[in-house]
């Protein structure tokens, strides 16, 4: 399929996991793709990598300017960079709350703010935010993380309303537990990684974790001109975790 032929995309957190799978898929389907990441050293052709920290507005603006210059415009923003957090309201400190909101919510706001002037010039402008089923599922030990993703969900709906008349669509994906380096780090920290993985899989109605490629396919659907009438939606990619 080449539905992205002639289109340009920027993927944040695109050096790893869901972001990398998305950048690769969009490039395979014809887009010219740039990646913004804390560590873009593993990003290779045909992708171009730009170093930025989404908690630092100046670094986001500089990376977006460089990326858009290299791409020759911008049609698609995949707002994906994010970090996890375990804990309850009693165990996470104010500093942790501020930091995770800074990355997961303000990071998307800063990147969107820098990209919107460029997206307005596109005939096929789309933003896809990587949210999570944590936004609505009520997961234990995830108060802080879930609150950030709840904010991303609300942000998606509000941005869709703000920008629909400018021809910019805004949607999000809500993945379940996805097999990425992030989950690899979580398992590595467990006392018995194999048992922890088996327990994680047993909690999935589908009996397995979601793959990064499956989330990338959902993001590509929402980013594609083929979904040109879809805005302000959340697409679950969770192996039935939320509905069952
Ligand atoms: P990952 O750790 O494999 O990749 C995250 C990428 O974001 C990394 O390349 C990292 O360098 C980059 N990043 C982190 N902080 C950054 C910052 N401050 N500035 C710029 N880049 C930064 O993780 P992943 O599992 O692919 O997660 C990607 C997104 O998917 C996140 O928003 C996460 O909340 C969401 N998500 C993940 C899962 C899951 O189970 N893995 C489930 C639901 C949602």
Image: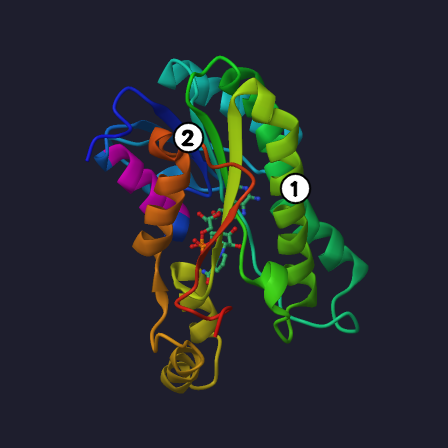
> Which region shows up in magenta?
19-27
The picture places residue 51, in percent across and down from the top left corner, at 47, 33
User: Which residue is drawn at the image coordinates 51% and 45% (left, top)?
Assistant: 172
Q: Quadrant of residue 90?
A: bottom right
The answer to if 23 sits in the magenta stretch is yes
Q: Is residue 165 above or below residue 175?
A: above
Which structural element holds mark 1? helix
For the N terminus, give its image quadrant.
top left
Q: Which residue sits furthest front?
A: 229
Residue toward you, 157 or 191: 157
Q: Quadrant of residue 146?
A: bottom right
User: Which residue is drawn at the image coordinates 39% and 60% (left, top)?
Assistant: 181
Judged left or right of residue 219, residue 174 is right
User: Which residue is drawn at the image coordinates 54% and 51% (left, top)?
Assistant: 131
User: Which residue is drawn at the image coordinates 30% and 53% (left, top)?
Assistant: 213
Q: Is residue 225 visible?
A: yes
Q: Give the residue number, with chain letter if any, for mark 2.
A: 228
Which structural element holds mark 2? loop
Q: Disc number at residue 127?
A: none
Residue toward you, 43 or 113: 113
The picture places residue 60, in percent across and down from the top left corner, at 57, 29
Real-space CA distance between mark 1 and mark 2, rounded to the nearest whole angstrom: 20 Å
């Amino acid at each position: 399929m080449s539905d992205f032929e002639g289109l340009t995309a920027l993927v944040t957190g695109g050096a790893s996991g869901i972001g990398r799978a998305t950048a690769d898929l969009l490039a395979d389907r014809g887009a010219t793709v740039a990646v913004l990441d804390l560590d873009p050293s593993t990003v290779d052709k045909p992708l171009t990598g730009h170093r930025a920290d989404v908690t630092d507005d100046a670094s986001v603006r500089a990376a977006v300017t460089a990326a858009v210059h290299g791409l020759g415009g911008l049609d698609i923003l995949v707002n994906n960079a994010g970090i996890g957090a375990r804990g309850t309201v009693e165990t996470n400190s104010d500093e942790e709350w501020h930091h995770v909101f800074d990355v997961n919510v303000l990071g998307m706001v800063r990147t969107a703010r820098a990209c919107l002037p460029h997206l307005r010039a596109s005939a096929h402008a789309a933003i896809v935010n990587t949210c999570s089923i944590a936004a609505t599922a009520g997961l234990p030990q995830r108060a802080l993380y879930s609150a950030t993703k709840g904010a991303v969900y609300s942000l998606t709906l509000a941005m869709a309303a703000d920008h629909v008349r400018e021809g910019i669509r805004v949607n999000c994906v809500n993945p379940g537990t996805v097999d990425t380096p992030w989950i690899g780090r979580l398992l590595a920290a467990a006392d018995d990684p194999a048992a922890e993985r088996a327990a994680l899989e047993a909690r999935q109605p589908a009996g397995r974790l979601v793959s990064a490629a499956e989330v990338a396919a959902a993001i590509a659907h929402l980013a594609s001109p083929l979904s040109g009438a879809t805005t302000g939606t959340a697409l679950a990619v969770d192996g039935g975790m939320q509905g069952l």
